[in-house]
Image (cartoon, rainbow, N blue to C red):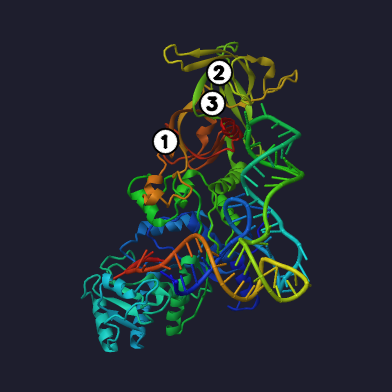
Amino acid sequence: MTKTPGPDFIRTIVEEDMKTNKWNGRIATRFPPEPNGYLHIGHAKSICLNFGIAKQYDGECHLRFDDTNPAKEEQEYIDSIKDNVRWLGFDWGEHEYYTSSYFDRLYEWAVRLIESGDAYVCDLDAEQIKEYRGTLTEPGRNSPCRDRSVEENLALFEKMKAGEFDEGSHVLRAKIDMSSPNINMRDPVMYRIIKANHPRTGGKWCIYPTYDFAHGQSDSIERITHSICTLEFEDHRPLYDWYLDKLGEHHPRQIEFARLNITYTLLSKRRLITLVEEGHVDGWDDPRMPTISGLRRRGFTPESIRDFCRRIGVAKSDNTIEIEYLEHCLREDLNKRAQRVMVVLNPLKVVIENYPDDLEEEFDAVNNPEDEVMGTRKVPFSKELYIERDDFMEDPPRKFFRLAPGREVRLRYAYFIRCTDVVKDDATGEIKELICTYDPLTRGGDAPDGRRVKGTLHWVSARHAKTCEVRLYDRLFTKLNPARGKRGRDWRTNINPDSVVILNNCKMEPFIECMKRFDNIQFERTGYFCVDPDTTPEKFVFNRTVSLRDSWAKIQKSQKK
RNA sequence: UGCGGCGUAGCCAAAUUGGUAAGGCGCCUGACUCUGGAUCAGGAGACUAGAGGUUCGAGUCCUCUCGCCGCAGCCA
């Protein structure tokens, strides 16, 4: 078991608050996704944080859908988010909320701010508002509508609500300070007109609050104690405080942390949507996607993702985690739980010339050396077998421990065999099959004379083999930081054209037929795989989750240098 | 040139009220092994962005400099 890291800076704050009884001993966090796309592993970090803290300090964690923009949000996303959070192993209990449930209250609050002279209806269009806002270094200018009377504002806002104006023609703005060094305080938009059907409120509204006008108040309404969010909202905190102060409402404590970045991976919702919509991947659950659904289909376990999130920690400094670290957490988990089987990905036929033609034997194979409880199974053996093409070389380099002409290796759980001949296609020179002899005395895999072999190969009896499909995945992007195209080129140029290779003629041992969709298994010596939902009674389809650590590949690499 | 953050080994990340730099991943050795997997045992690697200052003593306090990230949606 890995050691549990000490409390991160957020938990330190929570613990301090508990100690001082700041919230009367109550802890409430929330995970507030916008249902405009699928959750990805960056969200998992936030989910683990928020639900984790609630669990650890005996508090509650709300699942709140930030559904303030019906132009982008869909029920499908709401459903997928709930599935994903549940799959990750978290439970929000009764605490399922929607910002849209607060629309009436938000509207009343907006009216109140108009009445107190803190908000006004602005007729400027988007372009003009932008102009008036100023820049990072120059202050903005007041809108010509800024000094409208309360009565006029009330009337105008009412008309906005009644649908009398076109989209974009009017907005409600907070009257704060157009010369504030914090751009968020330069009379931010509170309400805009969007004439779209909302998944939950239907056609009731045609004006919708902006995220900034809704988020802080939603936290307040739900009596959240710790509003944990990412760094980019640091600049918004003064705005949320301003609204809550003006309204005289409960202030949660907002704490910002650095979002997750992973090498060779894109974690921006906008770009993930693009990948799906432009067909660069086969949907949100494509095993190459960093979405929770994608990771699941790839063969990740919830435990491995949670462990990853725990081990990377939480801090405020920008970070990029090496993708290998995620893979490490995955392997560690899979190693403990995955059923071992033998599957030959690129089959090369082996004929054992001194083995009886119609003899069949069965060998006991260990299901998981890490977990004796998982028991053993029978693996059939016969005269003709398949081994991995990569496990044979006619002219092997140094440190190649596998099969070669004249060399002896062990077939796992079976016999020692020696290669006596290589049969090739005369025309192409391609190796068609290998002729070998076996040593009957090595039955079970050990030589009574104490003779050792350097290599042990996995194999499948040709007569008993089932053909299956295996999809080998590689990283989706070729660059460490895929968001940055070379010299301003589009990020799409970083997509790896070889991110998936489909093998159609793989040979598996018959035992595997009892496996079910999403089951995690280890193909011995090759990697971890899972049963893809595309599997049919006629044909198994596997996804390679992650390869085994491969020190031979490492040796090859260093030999090339 | 504005505001807000951040800067501890290749990547993460700790360091109670200032006391003399945890841990994980990766890397290198070796052991063991019927998965070149796993496991086990060792090891290398940080003048804590830089420069001053306060102090007996600073990653931790002060000053200045440099670098990186975010912000100018009627997205969230």
* Viewer-nearest residue: A541 or A426: A426
Q: Amino acid at mark 2?
A: Glu
Q: Where residue A369 appears, x then y in whole percent?
A: 66, 37
What crowding class fits label 2: few (fewer than 14 Cα within 10 Å), some (14-19), or many (20 or more)?
few
Please, which chain is the residue tagged with disc 2 on?
A: A
The disc, 2 or 1, on the residue closer to the chain's N-terminal end is 2
Task: Read off the residue under disc 1.
Answer: A536
Q: Are marks 2 and 3 in contact (CB under 8 Å)?
A: no
Q: Label 3's element?
A: helix
Please, which chain is the residue tagged with disc 3 on?
A: A
Q: Where residue A465 appears, x then y in whole percent?
A: 50, 25
Q: Amino acid at mark 1?
A: Thr
Q: Is residue A207 visible?
A: no
Q: Is residue A484 visible?
A: yes
Front: mark 2 or 3: 2
What crowding class fits label 3: few (fewer than 14 Cα within 10 Å), some (14-19), or many (20 or more)?
few
Give the residue displayed 67% in from the left and 20% down from the top: A443
Count of marks placed on residues: 3
Q: Where residue A524 appears, x then y in whole percent?
A: 58, 33
Task: Read off the residue under disc 3.
Answer: A390
Q: Label 2's element?
A: loop
Q: Amino acid at mark 3?
A: Asp
Q: Quadrant of residue A362?
A: top right
Task: Read off the residue under disc 2.
Answer: A394
- Distance (Cα) linking label 2 and label 3: 11 Å
Q: Is residue A208 above or below residue B7?
A: below
Q: Is residue A528 above or below residue A177?
A: above
Could you tell whether A497 is left or right of A432 in the image?
left
